[in-house]
């Protein structure tokens, strides 16, 4: 393969990945052939016995196009953060493929190419869990707009979809070589049959699962209202001259259009209380009286609302602790959810999965000076405090509060579900990205959380998309983006504890465990011809 063709194939893989991703093309079937051009480049370099790092620029081109094509909208929020995400996430994905390339060179043959499944699944699992975590572009997320294909996510989670993608690409790669490069021509029909089965059987299984799900009409139900106040996060929400009272009144006016005597819960979005306050001093703030009065007016209705909060400590509590200027002690900032009712004390749960660069500065526990480079998008900046473990609210209903970025972490939400959550409540502010694919992708991923846990999702987004998703991942209601609104829905309690809720990303754990003996095996093995 001449060098110009290698680069054209690398570009083609990046384009196909982009076009397959939700709202960047949404041509989902392309995901099953998207890696084939890159695999042809990779194998061609091995056949020519090129240095292992000759493959590096090719895979980087592929993943840079993939990152730019699917998440360009990050630039609407922060140009510096966007450049960092595009450059470094592409770099990390490239290293995932580079490790596969080095193993493939040493092992060769069928075992070598199948190692891609182990290496990439382990890579995605690591990327879910480490300091630079960014799981947005996991291959399994591609199917969030094809939920009838992946009802089996209740057993595997997103990593099951990733493995499906990898197996499909490997088969079509083999099929391409057999058909067009005239290698093992006798196996062509066999490969066609296997590839068809790999594509069709999971979809058939998914449809069978969908049709066999039990009717939950007799489950306990709750009436829930989600509010979309549509407060501009750039020019209004965090404006020093804006008053929290006025913004809360705006939300309550919208909610009151839907709240009835049967309403159990009103949900308002992330940082709806944008003014930071000390949690144990909540009653001392002027807006507290407004919250309390509204609850009295509603009667039986509870409130779940996002807030920017602080806690005070005598000693340093965590990496997020900051010395109080000219005073004793430390304080920590949080992106929190606040649950209030007439009968119970106000309770806070802090966001655990933080946005890189804005809410968390990677490795700042080792290099504190990095905190100076945090990105200010309104509200608190720098590394925030977190909950050490996922939590849910246990009141008259058990609610899993999921704040913004947390909703793309399947295992995190599964741990909340496992604690007995009746339904999932997402509080978010997607207004930073403008009217771009960003907020659409984020809403779409929520459907996967519903399937994985067989729980309803109630989603309150500051500027949209807000809505309700049932336990099958079907959208029951959704709002229009950048429009003030409130939606009401009767939702059913999810009684089922899925395999995924119990075991989480076990496929990633298995892949990670297998990765080390695979690397050792390849290290001691002599290069093998393909």
Image (cartoon, rainbow, N blue to C red):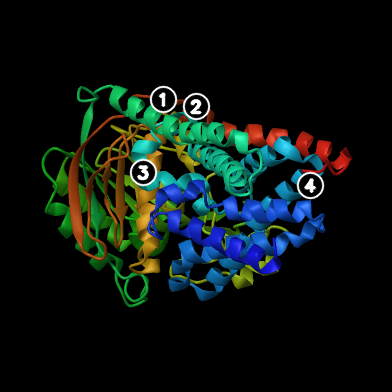
Residue at 50%, 56% (x, y): give it: 17
Query: Which numbered disc, 1 or 4, marks the residue that appears first in the sequence?
Result: 4
Q: Residue 146 carries which label?
A: 3
Q: Distance between the residues labelled 3 and 1?
A: 23 Å
Find residue 403 and report its horizontal and vertical position in percent.
41, 51
The residue at the point 36 percent across, 43 percent down is: 146
The dot on residue 116 is none
User: Do the numbered discs 2 and 1 sit on residues whose CB atoms are within 8 Å?
Assistant: yes
Q: Quadrant of residue 397?
A: top left
Mark 3 or 4 closer to N-term?
4
Q: Is residue 287 left or right of residue 121?
A: left
Which x, y percent locates residue 296?
17, 47
Dot in front, 3 or 1: 3
Marked residue nearer the N-terminal end (3 or 2)? 3
Of circles 2 and 4, which is in front?
4
Helix, strand or loop for disc 3: loop
- Residue at image x 26%, y 38%? 343
Foreground of the two, 318 or 231: 231
Crowd rating for badge 1 (residues with CA inside 10 Å; few <14, some 14–19, many 20+): some
Disc nearer the start of the sequence (2/4):
4
Residue, disc 1: 497
Query: Can residue 348 be seen from the camera position used here?
Result: no
- Front position in the image: 507 or 191: 191
Q: What residue sits right under mark 4 in the picture? A: 105
How far is mark 1 from mark 4, CA to CA? Answer: 43 Å
On the rendered image, what quadrant is the N terminus found in?
A: bottom right
């Amino acid at each position: 393969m001449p060098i110009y063709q290698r680069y054209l194939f690398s570009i083609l893989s990046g384009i196909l990945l982009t076009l397959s991703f939700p709202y960047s093309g949404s041509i989902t079937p392309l995901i099953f052939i998207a890696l084939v051009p890159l695999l042809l480049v990779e194998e061609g370099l091995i056949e020519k016995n090129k240095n292992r790092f000759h493959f590096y620029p090719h895979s980087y081109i592929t993943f840079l196009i993939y990152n730019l094509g699917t998440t360009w909208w990050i630039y609407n929020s922060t140009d510096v953060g966007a450049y960092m995400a595009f450059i470094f996430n592409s770099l990390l994905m490239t290293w995932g493929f580079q490790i596969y390339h080095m193993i493939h060179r040493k092992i060769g043959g069928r075992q070598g190419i199948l190692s891609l499944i182990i290496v990439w699944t382990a890579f995605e699992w690591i990327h879910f869990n480490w300091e630079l975590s960014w799981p947005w572009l996991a291959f399994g997320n591609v199917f969030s707009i094809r939920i009838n294909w992946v009802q089996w996510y209740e057993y595997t989670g997103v990593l099951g979809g990733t493995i499906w993608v990898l197996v499909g690409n490997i088969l079509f790669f083999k099929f391409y070589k057999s058909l067009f490069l005239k290698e093992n021509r006798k196996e062509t029909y066999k490969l066609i049959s296997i590839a068809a089965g790999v594509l069709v059987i999971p979809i058939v299984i998914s449809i069978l699962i969908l049709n066999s799900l039990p009717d939950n009409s007799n489950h306990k139900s709750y009436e829930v209202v989600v509010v979309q106040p549509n407060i501009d996060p750039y020019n209004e929400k965090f404006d020093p001259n804006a008053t929290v009272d006025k913004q809360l009144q705006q939300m309550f006016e919208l909610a009151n259009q839907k709240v009835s005597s049967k309403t159990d819960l009103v949900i308002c979005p992330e940082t709806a209380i944008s003014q930071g306050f000390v949690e144990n001093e909540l009653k001392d703030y002027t807006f507290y009286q407004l919250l309390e009065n509204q609850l009295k007016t509603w009667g039986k209705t509870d409130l779940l609302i996002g807030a920017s909060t602080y806690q005070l400590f005598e000693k340093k509590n965590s990496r997020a602790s900051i010395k109080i200027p000219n005073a004793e002690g430390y304080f920590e900032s949080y992106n929190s959810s606040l649950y209030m009712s007439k009968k119970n004390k106000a309770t806070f749960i802090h966001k655990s999965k933080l946005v890189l660069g804005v809410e968390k500065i990677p490795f700042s526990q080792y290099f504190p000076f990095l905190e100076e480079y945090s990105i200010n998008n309104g509200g608190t900046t720098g590394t925030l405090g977190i909950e050490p473990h996922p939590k849910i609210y246990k009141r008259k209903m058990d609610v899993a509060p999921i704040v913004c970025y947390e909703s793309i972490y399947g295992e995190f939400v599964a741990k909340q579900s496992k604690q007995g959550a009746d339904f999932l409540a997402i509080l978010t502010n997607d207004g930073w990205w403008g009217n771009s694919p960003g907020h659409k992708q984020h809403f779409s991923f929520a459907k996967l959380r519903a399937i994985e846990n067989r729980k309803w999702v109630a989603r309150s987004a500051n500027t949209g998309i807000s809505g309700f998703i049932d336990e099958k991942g079907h959208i029951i209601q959704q709002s229009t983006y950048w429009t003030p609104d409130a939606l009401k829905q009767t939702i059913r309690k999810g009684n089922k504890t899925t395999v995924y809720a119990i075991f989480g990303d076990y496929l990633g754990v298995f892949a990670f465990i297998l990765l080390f003996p695979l690397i050792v095996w390849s290290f001691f093995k002599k290069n093998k011809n393909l």
